Amino acid sequence: MNVPKPSQPLDVVAPCLKRDLPKLSLAYKNLKRFVPMKQLHVITARRNFARFESALGREVVLLDEDQMIPGMTLSALEVIPLARLSQGPGWYFKQLLNFQFAFHKMEDDYYLIWDADTIPLRPLEFFDDQNRMLLTKAWEFHQPYFLTYEKILGRPAQREFSFIAQHMIVRKSIVREMLAEIERHCPGNENWAWKIMRNLGGEGSNRFAEYETYGHYIKEKYPQLVAFRELPWLREGTNKCGRYPSPAALEKLGEKYFYASFEDSERLYRRTGRKVRDWLRKVEKEFR
């Protein structure tokens, strides 16, 4: 299949909870303005469909989250016997749904994962002039993500930077190849989604990241297909502008940033708490 040229529209996929719909509504307006988008696909619970259609319009494709991954629903995931899964099964489920879209509309080989609470502020392209996919670099490091990577793929990730940048351009055929490799490597008869959840590495509440997994996989196996870029972006948009920023506030942010994330304060608190816990564990090990 031919590689899309720069500016060719892409399908965009965004799993979304009901509470994040107001932010996704803001994001959708700017996605249409700043991103070469073919169509927005929103994955959510079926009970949310009427509200989402009213807010976003009928041109948006709504997908039932419990009908996406064969053999896996959110309620089934909620009873998985994993210690310290305090981040919540929905947080993991969202990431698995992002991968499952690689089996949807298979006539198109590319799509864009976009976090529902993230708003683009300037024009964005996702292929360079050599038709390579542009992956945005980030700088966070959370060791359990990479322990999981090694468990599910059988080798360590060659980490140089992070890929947790609130969005990612994805090639479906490569995602499907990666998931098939996970199924072969991990024992048992379950599918890739369950095998990931049965093989989370490390400790704590955040133990898997689809962005880190796919990003490091393609960087290792298909480096000729990707290029890496740095973009100024803001993660703490809620702290600067509140949960639901005004158009004027977004225009102001766009003077400095390409996009901004508006995470709930609860999520920001959890992430800060996680960093503190990680630091305390590190200090404890040094003084043993």
Image: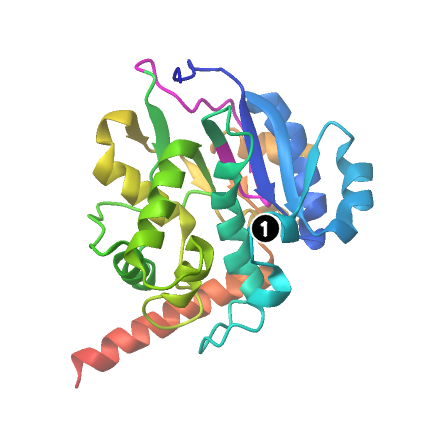
- Hey, which residue is sitting farthest front in the picture? 189
Does 97 sit above or below residue 75?
above
What range is drawn magenta here?
112-130
- Magenta span: helix, strand or loop, mainly? loop
Q: Exactly how many numbered labels are in the figure?
A: 1
- Helix, strand or loop at label 1? It is helix
Percent coordinates x, y for residue 183 in the rendering: 36, 53
Q: Nearer the viewer, residue 79 or 34?
A: 79
The answer to whether 165 appears left or right of 65 in the picture is: left
Name which quarter of the figure residue 148 lies in. bottom left
The answer to whether 75 appears left or right of 127 in the picture is: right
Percent coordinates x, y for residue 68 in the rendering: 59, 47
| Mark 1: amino acid | Thr
Q: Quadrant of the C terminus?
A: bottom left
Q: Nearer the viewer, residue 222 or 245?
A: 222
Name the residue located 33 percent from the left edge and 33 percent from the top edge. Answer: 230
Name the residue located 50 percent from the left edge and 67 percent from the top edge. Answer: 270
- Residue indicated by mark 1: 238
Q: Is residue 114 magenta?
A: yes
